[in-house]
Image (cartoon, rainbow, N blue to C red):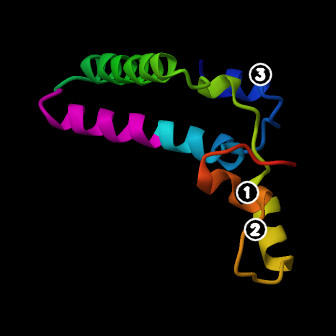
Amino acid sequence: MGRDAIKQRKTIAINDNLLDRMNATELAANQFRMTQTRDKLASGVNSQSQAIRTHEQVGKEVRDAIKRIGGTLPENIPPAEHIKEVEKRIQQTTPKLTLDERDAGGLLGGKTKS
């Protein structure tokens, strides 16, 4: 799925950056896909068509791994709170020594409550 199709599926505004609405799991999957693609491209990919095939192959393998593990495919993960809203909330919050479930969910790998 392309960026615009994913945004439409998740009902994310066309003007919003998709990365600004990803949760920790989705960001990590994308980062893993990008680093693996970069490393594979560096090992001798010489043409644009070969680079495109490499990108698609690595993306498919990452998706297959997510499926095997039993995880949720990125396009099925609900959009996270917009990063600007998170920043605003953090600025308005008094620092504390413990995190409640909403604040720690992404760090602990759980789901956050909205």
- The image quarter containing residue 48 is top left
Q: Residue 70 falls in which quadrant of the image?
A: top right
Residue sitting at x 17%, y 27%: 45
* Residues under numbered marks 2 and 1 in contact, where contact means CB atoms less than 8 Å apart: yes
Q: Which residue is drawn at 82% across and 60% down?
A: 85
Q: Is mark 3 on a helix, strand or loop?
A: helix
Q: In the image, is 53 to the left or to the right of 102?
A: left
- Give residue 87's mark: 2
| Residue that extends furthest to the left in the rendered view of this protein | 44
Query: Residue 61 location, x and y as percent?
Result: 37, 19
In the image, the segment drawn in magenta is: 31-45
In this rendering, the answer to whether 44 lies above or below 32 is above
Above or below for 44 versus 81:
above
Instruction: Describe the element under mark 1 as helix, strand or loop.
Output: helix
Question: What residue lies at 69% left-to-right and 21% top-to-bottom?
Answer: 5
Closer to the camera in the image, 95 or 18: 95
- Residue at 67 percent of width and 40 percent of height: 18
Q: Name the residue under label 3.
A: 9
| Percent coordinates x, y for residue 26 in the rendering | 58, 38
